Image (spheres, rainbow, N blue to C red):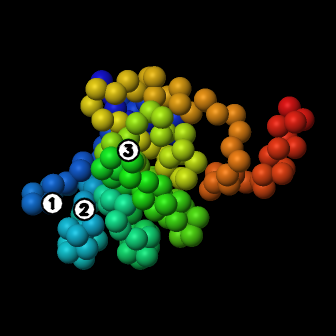
Amino acid sequence: MPRLIRNRQIVTGDRWVFQDADASLPQGAVDLVLPLDQYAEQREQLRESHQGRLGLVVDGTVTDDEIAPLLDELALVAIDFPSFTDGRGYSLARQLRQIHGYRGELRAVGNVLRDQLAYMERVGFDSFLLEAGRDTADALKAFGEFSAYYQNAPLDQLPRLRRRQQMRAA
C-alpha cells in the first residue's frame, strides 16, 4: 500500500532511497537521502561521483543555518518527526522556505499523522511519508478540512485582510 503523498497526490513509486548511516553508498544513478553527519563527511565524494539526486534527512534539533549552505545541492530535505508532539520540524520547514528560499522537495517523515498534514503543508512541506498501516486515501481528506486560516504561511500570497475580503466576495 502506498504511503507517500506528494503535492496532494498519492505516489506509488518513490525513487528516493534512505541510506543507513553505516551502510556503504550505492553505485549508479540512485536518488539518495543521507543523514546530515554522513552527508557532511562524504560531501566532496558525493558531489564528484554520485550520479543521482541527493537529499538530506534531519530532525528538529538541526538549525536552518546548519543546512542553509547545502540547500543548492539538495533536491530533497526530509524532516523527521520522532513524535507527534515534537513541533520543531514545523519551524525548521518554515525557515527553510521563507528565510532561505528552498524550492526543492520538503518531506515530512517519521510520526506523521493525518491530522497534521494541512498544518505541515502550510509551513512548506510538499510531501509526506506516512507510517506503515496509515490509510493514505483517508489522509488526503485532511487537506480539504479547513477553508480559511488566520495565520500567515509561506503559501499565502496575500495578507490576511485581502484573503478575508476574497472569502466574503465568494
State the mark number for residue 158: none
Instruction: Give the secondary structure at mark 3.
Output: loop
Amino acid type, mark 1: Ala
Q: Quadrant of the C terminus?
A: top right
**Residue 165 in picture, x, y percent from top left:** 87, 43
- Dot 2 surroundings within 10 Å: few (below 14), some, or many (20 or more)? some
The one nearer the camera, 135 or 4, is 135
Counting the numbered discs, the total is 3
Residue of label 3: 84
Numbered tag placed on residue 21 in the rendering? 1
**Image position of 41 (left or right of 100):** left
Report crowding for label 1: few under 14, some 14 to 19, many 20 or more residues within 10 A (C-alpha): few
Give amino acid for label 3. Phe
Residue tagged by mark 2? 35
Q: Residue at x 52, y 65 (%)?
A: 95
- Residue 67 in the image, given as x and y percentages of width and height: 39, 71
**Nearest to viewer (mark 3 / mark 2):** 3
CA gap between label 1 and label 2 equals 7 Å
Q: Are marks 1 and 2 in contact (CB under 8 Å)?
A: yes
Q: Nearer the viewer, mark 1 or mark 3?
A: 3
Q: Is residue 70 left or right of residue 126?
A: left
Of mark 1 and mark 2, the one earlier in the sequence is: 1
In the depicted structure, whether residue 46 falls above or below residue 106:
below
| Amino acid, disc 2 | Pro
Residue closer to the observer: 125 or 61: 61
Q: CA distance from mark 1 to mark 3?
A: 24 Å
In which quadrant is the N terminus drawn? top left
Q: Is residue 118 left or right of residue 112?
A: right
Q: Is residue 161 visible?
A: yes
